[in-house]
Amino acid sequence: MDVYKTEEEQVEAIKKWWQENGKSIIAGVVIGITAIFGWRAYDNHTAVQAEQASLLYEQMLVAARTNDEENVRVYGNRIFDDYKSSTYAVFASLMLAKVAAESGKLEEAETHLRWVLKNSSQAEFKHIARLRLARVLIASDKLDLATETLNVSKPGDFVARYDELRGDIYVKQGKSDEAIKAYERSLANSKGTGDAQSILQMKLNDLGRS
């Protein structure tokens, strides 16, 4: 403001500047405040949504432990209807697929698992869904689709499980030599429990490889 010669000129300059720019400043402040409170409201809303979805999933787990398939579906569908964008929808879908597969409803299980593959952003969940989907496809004798499902470039920590399922496919195709190689790779990379390794060894024994 040093360019102005008198205080009166300074006041008039401020008045003029405010007339020209004041409305936009107020609007900016209002927008900023609204954004802050809007984000807080959104954050609170997200937390409430997550808590409600979590409670439904807990009820779903209780129903699953008591083999209450009807309520598993009821709670799972409620999660899908109201909280489809939450991680709990992925959990619910995996559970619904498990219940469907155990009931022999393989197409329904396949649908739930494909939903996880399409909608989950977590690599670990995608691997779990892909492996379970491959099992469902093998049980459905969709061996080509199962093989295609297992074709991933980065299996990560799940490499042993991918090879085990490839072995299962080869067995159903009558390709014993390929199955043995797949099971041996799986056994070599297995980081699981002793039970998992025992199952692999049993599969090898069934193929005549001790």
Image (tube, grey):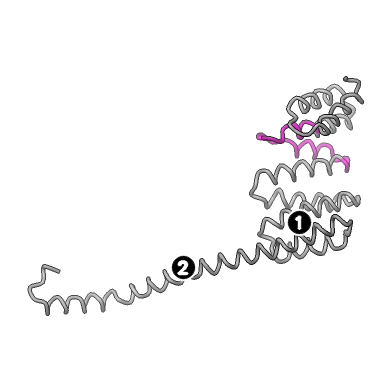
Q: Which residues are magenta?
A: 139-164
Against 77, is 167 above or below?
above
Left or right, 107 with respect to 155, comes to right
Left or right, 66 with respect to 33, comes to right
Q: Residue at x 73, y 31 (%)?
A: 191
| Earlier residue among tags 1 and 2 | 2
Q: Position of residue 80 (x, y in %)?
A: 73, 62
Indicate whether residue 72 is drawn in magenta.
no
Q: Residue furthest left?
A: 5
Indicate whether residue 148 is drawn in magenta.
yes
* Labels 1 & 2 near each other (Cβ < 8 A): no
What secondary structure prevails in the magenta region? helix
Q: Residue at x 81, y 30 (%)?
A: 197
Q: Position of residue 176 (x, y in %)?
A: 88, 24
Label 1 crowding class (10 Å Cα cut-off): few <14, some 14-19, many 20+?
many
Badge 1 amino acid? Ala
Q: Residue at x 65, y 44 (%)?
A: 123
- In the picture, the disc for residue 36 is 2
Q: Which residue is mark 1?
A: 92
Against 6, is 173 above or below?
above
